[in-house]
Amino acid sequence: MTEARQPDAAAGRAGPVAGPARRGTLKRPWVGFVFVLPMLVLFLLFRFLPAIGAFFLSLTDYRISGKWDFIALDNYTRLLSDKVFHEALLVTITYTVIFVPLTVLLSLGTAVLLHQVVWRRGFFRGVFFLPYVTSIVLAAVIWKWIYDAQDGLLNAVLGLVSIGPIDFLSQSNTVLPSIALTSAWKGFGYSMLILLAGLQAVPKSYLEAAMIDGAGTWQRFRYVTLPQLRPVLFFVLVIETIGAFQVFDAMYVMTGGGPVRSSYSLVYFLYDSGFKYFDFGYASAIGLVLFLIVLIVSLVQRRLVGRDD
């Protein structure tokens, strides 16, 4: 009889200990707030407040001397009629349309290959991720030499099959794809790791059930793996789209915005307005319009790819 009652006594002792501990945690929500407070302060100081300041700055004619005049929405009306803005917006959208699918497909394809490889997976993962930690300036300088019409590696290879030479960075129809390829090579490693983690999180039981039902490799990937990857793909699409709309340094190093503004992005336009012509109010208006464009595109992507679960 004594031995039969021991589990009940142990359970009775365990219950009161766990209960108050949980209730005590719920009664002290400030503990979690303390942990997030440092990041919250940094976000307010370096993200939120500068954004508010940029909005008010966009409503002024702010000069480098520190003097300013309130001009309301004049910077925005000027922006809508600015031909250079229209050209920069078209360049940015074209670049984004090239860069985002290229990067996502490259990242997904590499992640799928690494997911299937067992031997030396960590080594290959590090090799593919290495370009991401490389300086974009260094990568742009290297790829600028690769694209060179006279001494470039790519034209040397094309010359073996009697093609070229092609001046990739000096022609309007090849400059954006060339820069997009450079940026995709530089940054696909980050998205690859995220997608690889998503692939490894797909329950094996789903794939085994599909295999038992006779689904082939492509059918398992199309109807089982991809639906499970939707949240991860949505995240990758958003971060790559934001990066595409913010492109500047690769264009600055490789082409300087040329030829004839064929690689002159919105951020390049913002840079020139603010730091070349010191038109800070106008540059702030460009930044806020860029923010709104990215926000709208992200919402559309959420509608098409994201899901609420």
Image: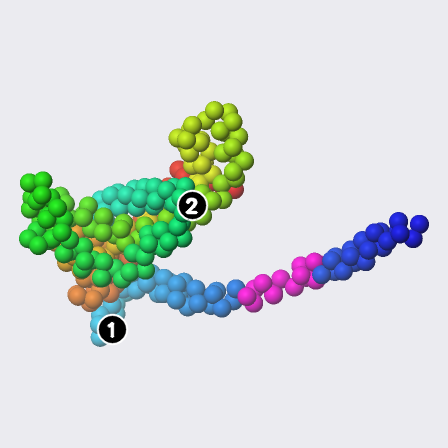
Element type at mark 2: loop
Query: Closest to the observer: 186 or 261?
Result: 186
Residue type at mark 2: give it: Val
Q: Secondary structure at mark 1?
A: loop
Percent across and percent down for residue 24 are: 70, 62
Q: Quadrant of residue 27?
A: bottom right
The numbered disc on residue 150 is: none
Predominant SS of the magenta segment = helix
Q: Which mark is residue 67?
A: 1
Q: Residues within 10 Å of mark 2 (few under 14, many from 20)?
A: few
Can residue 33 be found in the magenta stretch? Answer: yes
Res. 118 mark: 2
Residue sitting nearer the eye, 71 or 232? 232
Q: Position of residue 56 (x, y in %)?
A: 33, 63
Q: Give left or right: position of 204 versus 11.
A: left
Rounded to the nearest whole Å, what is the CA distance between mark 1 and mark 2? 64 Å
How many numbered marks are there? Answer: 2
Q: Position of residue 290 (x, y in %)?
A: 29, 53
Q: Position of residue 287 (x, y in %)?
A: 29, 57
At x 43%, y 64%, the residue is: 43
- What residue occupies the far top of the structure in this picture? 214
**Is residue 270 something one can see in this rendering?**
no
Q: Can residue 156 be seen in this snapshot?
A: yes
Magenta residues (range): 22-35
Residue extending farthest right: 1
For the point 82% across and 55% down, the residue is: 10
Is tag 1's residue or tag 2's residue first in the polypeptide sequence? 1
- Residue positioned 76% across, 60% down in the render: 17
x 71%, y 61%: residue:
21
